[in-house]
Amino acid sequence: MNKFFTLIATLLATTMLIGCSTEKKIGLQLYSVHQDMSDVAASLQKVADAGYNVVETLGSPTCFGMSAEEFKALCDEKGLEIISTHTSIGMNDPEAMQKWHNVFAGLKTMGAKYCVIPGFNLGSNLQELKAVCDYFNEVGKIGKEYGIKLGYHNHSHEYNVMEDKIMWEYMIENTDPELVFFQMDVYWTSRAGKDPVAYLKKYPERIQMLHIKDDLVIGDSGKIDFEAIFTEFYKNGFKDYVVEQEMPYDKNSTREENFARMWDGVAKSATYLNTSKFVK
């Protein structure tokens, strides 16, 4: 009888250990490989084989010519969780709000958490920029109806000064925290001469997602302190990030050679993140 109880205890302990083990969530913005997405299924398989299990897609309610239902089914088949998308609708579009409803409905079908605007016409003065912030708040209200958070992704120009205000800071301070968050691209922030960690400390509740990016392979340039960035981001209580890579184009190389460099780059970035102890 004692042997029986010992066996049961061992099985329970093993089960608990397995249940507690966690796999890192390594995300990829599919813009990184969008030039080689003519065969969507094959390319998504390459993404999974490269070491990713999370994706941020492009568009909604259709993605790469597929419906939200079809795209989700394909990602599920490949073991890829759809966390977000990059998409935008101009504020002067008379059908903008109905189109946003369609966007968020598609994202809900895909099981996404976020919808990120990847750049926008921010105007030429603070009055116009305030109108953009108001528009984002209205769109964020629609997203909230679907359980989707609206975010904004920066490049370097948002750090330009407009009427004595840094545009990106003005946007953070003039959008509703309940309706709009910010996805900081650490590469473009650094390229603008700003410190990503300093901004994570200044706006700990507003920066809720990161774009992890480097000159090409994450960590290779040595220009960005990814450990400090991840440490502060986790400290703020957030964890969602995706890798983004620009196409490594060489005009003297063939299309196939450029694609090979592209896939090699995204795979090496996944390996860097998977093997880095500071990435949870």
Image: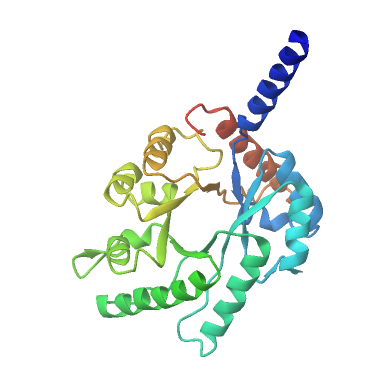
Instruction: Say which quadrant the N terminus sits in.
Output: top right
Compare residues 160 and 55 and report the one nearer the observer.
55
x and y percentages locating residue 199 in the rendered image:
31, 48
x and y percentages locating residue 27 in the rendered image:
59, 46
x and y percentages locating residue 92 in the rendered image:
46, 86
Direction left: furthest residue: 164
Compare residues 248 and 96 and report the one nearer the observer.
96
Direction front: furthest residue: 1
Q: Is residue 108 left or right of residue 69?
A: left
x and y percentages locating residue 56 in the rendered image:
60, 55
Instruction: Identify which residue is drawn at 29% across, 62% down.
Output: 160
Q: Is residue 154 visible?
A: no
Instruction: Identify which residue is drawn at 63% across, 42% down.
Output: 266
Compare residues 62 and 159 and report the one nearer the observer.
62
Instruction: Identify which residue is drawn at 81% across, 51% down.
Output: 42
Q: In the image, is residue 267 above or below residue 12? A: below
Q: In the image, is residue 27 above or below residue 22? A: below
Q: In the image, is residue 157 above or below residue 28? A: below
